Image (spheres, rainbow, N blue to C red):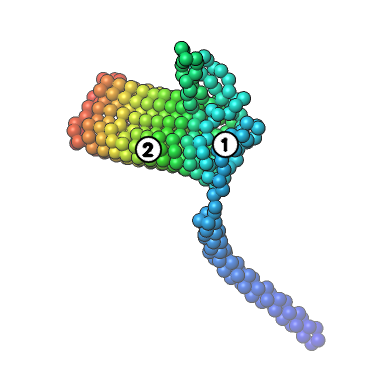
């Protein structure tokens, strides 16, 4: 009898342990579900508060003022330039660096800058100059001497606001350049520049006045995705590997004639308001012009397309010209919108017609 009672109590004790374990397990599982439900909400809340705090800090931040002459003195001392959220007062003329200039030819001086130039969120009130000329010689014989700049290190002007003209004509860059999210409020020129860097970025750029990048050479890639041009957008004679220009807006059209692309051209979802030209260009790789809108005249006269070309769902509101152009592969023309019949000749003497 005694042993039976003890056995009963033993089993009762074990059952209570199992019951407690079961209860605790259920509580644990419920708590775990509640916690995992709350965590995403808390993470979203913390993220929102962090963004709000960052936005608040941006709103109240004060830009410090820096004289352009001070920047040039630091470069002359061999110091890297790293400026964030600063106002640059005066003209930043890189050709003014004494002791950094060499005579390249009787009429050409080159300033060599080997320091890193890093500007982020800066406002340039004066001109930014990397190309200049001066009249030199005696009274009987005078001639113009041109000055250009060779940048031997990283050059970054991220999210910068240029209030006056910008001139980088004939500059050479040993590495890539970065002008992402830059705003150019006056005429800007990058004519005849050359870069050795693989990545050259002008993403989400805004150019309120004329923007020129004529006869420039890029060993690597060039990215103007999301750029906005309110006046001239001139890339005539450019030489580049891959060129990304998707989501670009050009109020007065774009000039890409006499261009040479060894890689691909991505020109999707582009809006061009004025006349545009792709004439006399050579496209060795793929060309994508998907869902573009051209409000002005467009010419592809004597353009050579060696790779696959797609114009699918693009809209041409005025005259479109393919005189003497050459397509080595049959282009895709699905749902292309034109206002007059168009004929395209392929290299195999096949005629493709687009009707309104």
Classed neighbour count for the residue bearing mark 1: other residues with Cα under 10 Å, few (<14), some (14–19), many (≥20): some
**Along the viewing direction, whichever of 344 and 321 lies nearer the viewer:** 321
Labels 1 and 2 touching (C-beta < 8 A): no
Which residue in the structure is indicated by mark 1? 69
Residue 46 position within the rendered picture, expressed as x and y whole percent measured from the top left: 56, 61
Which residue in the structure is indicated by mark 2? 209
Above/below status of 238 relative to 160? above
Q: Residue at x 38, y 40 (%)?
A: 208
Q: Residue at x 26, y 25 (%)?
A: 322
**Along the viewing direction, whichever of 141 and 239 lies nearer the viewer:** 141
> Which numbered marker is on residue 237?
none
Badge 1 or badge 2: first in the primary sequence: 1
**Quick one: which residue is furthest to the top in this view?**
140
Quadrant containing the N terminus is bottom right
Query: How far apart are the two marked residues, 1 and 2, measured between alpha carbons?
Result: 26 Å
Horizontal side of 247 relative to 91 (left or right) equals left
């Amino acid at each position: 009898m005694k042993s039976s009672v003890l056995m009963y109590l033993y089993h009762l004790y074990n059952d209570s342990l199992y019951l407690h374990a079961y209860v605790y397990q259920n509580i644990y599982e419920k708590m775990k579900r509640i916690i995992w439900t709350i965590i995403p909400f808390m993470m979203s809340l913390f993220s929102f508060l962090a963004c709000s705090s960052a936005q608040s800090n941006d709103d109240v931040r004060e830009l410090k003022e820096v004289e352009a002459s001070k920047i040039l003195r630091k470069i002359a001392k061999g110091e890297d330039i790293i400026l964030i959220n600063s106002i640059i007062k005066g003209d930043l003329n890189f050709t003014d660096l004494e002791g950094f200039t060499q005579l390249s030819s009787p009429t050409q001086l080159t300033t060599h800058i080997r320091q890193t130039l890093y500007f982020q969120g800066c406002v340039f009130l004066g001109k930014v100059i990397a190309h200049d000329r001066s009249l030199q010689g005696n009274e009987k014989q005078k001639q113009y001497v041109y000055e250009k700049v060779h940048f031997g290190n990283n050059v970054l002007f991220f999210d910068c606001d240029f209030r006056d003209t910008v001139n980088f004509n004939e500059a050479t860059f040993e590495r890539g350049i970065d002008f992402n999210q830059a705003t150019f409020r006056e005429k800007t020129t990058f004519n005849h520049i050359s870069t050795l860097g693989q990545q050259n970025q002008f993403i989400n750029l805004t150019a309120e006045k004329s923007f020129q990048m004529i006869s420039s050479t890029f060993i690597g890639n060039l990215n103007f995705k999301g750029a906005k041009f309110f006046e001239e957008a001139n890339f005539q004679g450019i030489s580049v590997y891959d060129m990304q220009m998707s989501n670009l807006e050009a109020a007065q059209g774009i000039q890409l004639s006499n261009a040479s692309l060894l890689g691909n051209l991505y020109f999707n979802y582009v809006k061009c308001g004025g006349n545009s030209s792709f004439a006399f260009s050579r496209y060795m790789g793929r060309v994508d012009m998907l869902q573009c809108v051209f409000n002005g005249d467009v010419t592809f006269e004597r353009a050579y397309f060696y790779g696959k070309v797609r114009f699918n769902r693009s809209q041409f509101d005025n005259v479109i010209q393919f005189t003497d152009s050459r397509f080595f592969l049959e282009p895709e023309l699905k749902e292309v919108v034109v206002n007059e019949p168009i004929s395209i000749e392929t290299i195999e003497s096949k005629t493709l017609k687009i009707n309104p």
